[in-house]
Image (cartoon, helix red, strand yellow):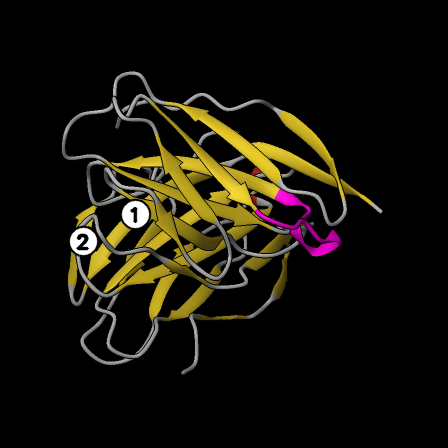
Amino acid sequence: DAKTTQPNSMESNEEEPVHLPCNHSTISGTDYIHWYRQLPSQGPEYVIHGLTSNVNNRMASLAIAEDRKSSTLILHRATLRDAAVYYCILRSAQKLVFGQGTRLTINP
Amino acid sequence: NAGVMQNPRHLVRRRGQEARLRCSPVKGHSHVYWYRQLPEEGLKFMVYLQKENIIDESGMPKERFSAEFPKEGPSILRIQQVVRGDSAAYFCASSRDRERNYGYTFGSGTRLTVV
């Protein structure tokens, strides 16, 4: 599976937007970009995924660069409940391969 | 719709005992994956199963670990003769299809403590 690079940690304030970056310069044409998050003491939770076009759902938005070598997960209005580790994963094979992710801290 | 159900949530075993972890996938999902998360570490893939078949066990330790997903009933991850290093959170996930355009649904995990 192609590798992704994410910052180890990020911090934001409650009710502000959060942009979580992910670099994936070795992405292949058939790789889907998936995002999951893991809240403390819980299992990972699917957030969003996309291939080429930007995607929106009730949880977040995914902005994919035109060359697909990077993407950004956007939380439009962070709450304290969004504090978690966020994983950006390229899905080329059947299994998901998790990296270290970005630990997001939300300040009240 | 029930999600992925894992039980028990917490399991304590003495060294040398067997641990059996159960996972019931989302109704209609026929693909099951097991992951292990050691304390303060990331999730590591262990095994991918479909009904009655092991598809990818590249992440399974060669000894003491086995997994099955029978035609009827939950998927089982079995750890024989547990050691302290097996203490971890074990997560099961299921998906509807093998296609990359579907997400996984994860369970809440089983936290195994070996004493």
Compared to residue A107, the image places residue A11 above or below, namely: above
- Residue located beneath label 2 in the image: B54
Spot occupied by residue A4 in the image (x, y as percentages of width and height) = 39, 24
Spot occupied by residue A74 in the image (x, y as percentages of width and height) = 52, 41
Compared to residue B75, the image places residue A27 above or below, namely: above
- Residue sitting at 70 percent across and 56 percent down? A81
- Viewer-closest of A13 and B20: A13
Q: Chain of mark 1?
A: B
Q: Secondary structure at mark 1?
A: strand
Q: Chain of mark 2?
A: B
Return the mark for residue B47.
1
Q: Can I make out residue B88 in this image?
A: yes
Would residue A9 be found to the left or right of residue A55 on screen? right
Upstream in sequence: badge 2 or badge 1: 1
Quadrant of the snapshot with the N terminus of chain B: bottom left
Amino acid found under the numbered disc labelled 2: Ile
Spot occupied by residue B96 in the image (x, y as percentages of width and height) = 23, 65
- Residue sitting at 45 percent across and 30 percent down? A99
| Whether label 2 touches label 1, CB < 8 Å | yes
Amino acid found under the numbered disc labelled 1: Val
Q: Secondary structure at mark 2?
A: strand
Identify the residue at the far top of this view. Answer: A25
The residues tagged by marks 2 and 1 sit, at their Cα atoms, a distance apart of 8 Å
**Region of the chain picked out in magenta, as a range:** A76-84
- Viewer-closest of A15 and B55: A15
- Same-chain check, marks 2 and 1: yes
